[in-house]
Structures are given as structure tokens and as C-alpha cells.
Image: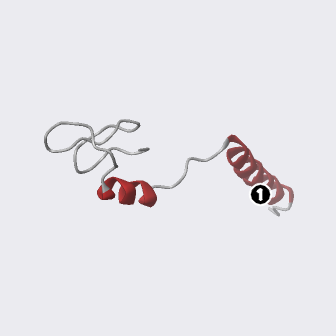
Amino acid sequence: MSVRCPLCGAKPKEKCTLSTGKPSVKTHLDRNLAAAQTSAPESFGQAWLRSLKAATSLGMRILFHHP
């Protein structure tokens, strides 16, 4: 339920609806497939490590750069 349902248009965190407009007991298969194709959100720790790696790489290039 982390993505919009492509079949019924239910918003993220909302239950899917049937063609009658009543709530569905299960989420639609298309919604499950769409959620599986999206990547997981990056955690704070992962973002910090990525930033640290980029800064270290830049620092090394500047340090060892020969004019």
C-alpha cells in the first residue's frame, strides 16, 4: 500500500476499492507489482555514508591532483 493503485486509483496508505466502490479485502495484484518495482527509500544512515564516500573521493582527487 506504499504506492497508488494503478487499477482503482487508491492513494498510498489507502485500501483498494472494488468496481462497486466498496473497500477491497485484498490489494490488487497490479498494485503489489508496482510496489515491488519501486526502490526502497534510502535511510538516514545510507544517505550519510553515500555523502561521506563522495566527500572522501573528492578530497582524495584534490589531494593527489597534479597541475
Tell how many labels.
1
Q: Residue at x 17, y 36 (%)?
A: 21
Q: Say which residue label 1 marks.
A: 57
Q: Is residue 65 left or right of residue 35?
A: right
Viewer-closest of 55 and 2: 2
Q: How is the image coloured?
A: secondary structure
**Percent position (x, y) of residue 4?**
33, 44
Q: Residue at x 51, y 55 (%)?
A: 39
Across and down, in percent, residue 62 comes to 80, 55
Q: Is residue 67 left or right of residue 36?
A: right
The quarter of the rendered structure image containing the C terminus is bottom right
Label 1 residue SS? helix
**Mark 1: which amino acid?**
Ser
- Hey, which residue is sitting farthest front in the picture? 25
Residue at 42% from the left image edge and 54% from the top image edge: 35
Q: Residues within 10 Å of mark 1 (few under 14, many from 20)?
A: few
Image spot of residue 58 (x, y percent)? 75, 54
* Residue at 24 percent of width and 42 percent of height: 9
Residue at the limit of the structure toward the left, as seen here: 20
Left or right for 7, reference 64: left
In this rendering, is residue 23 above or below 31? above
**Residue 56 placement (x, y as % from top left):** 80, 53
Which of the two residues, 54 or 59, is positioned nearer the viewer here? Answer: 54
Image quarter hosting the N terminus: top left
Quadrant of residue 65 within the rendered picture: bottom right
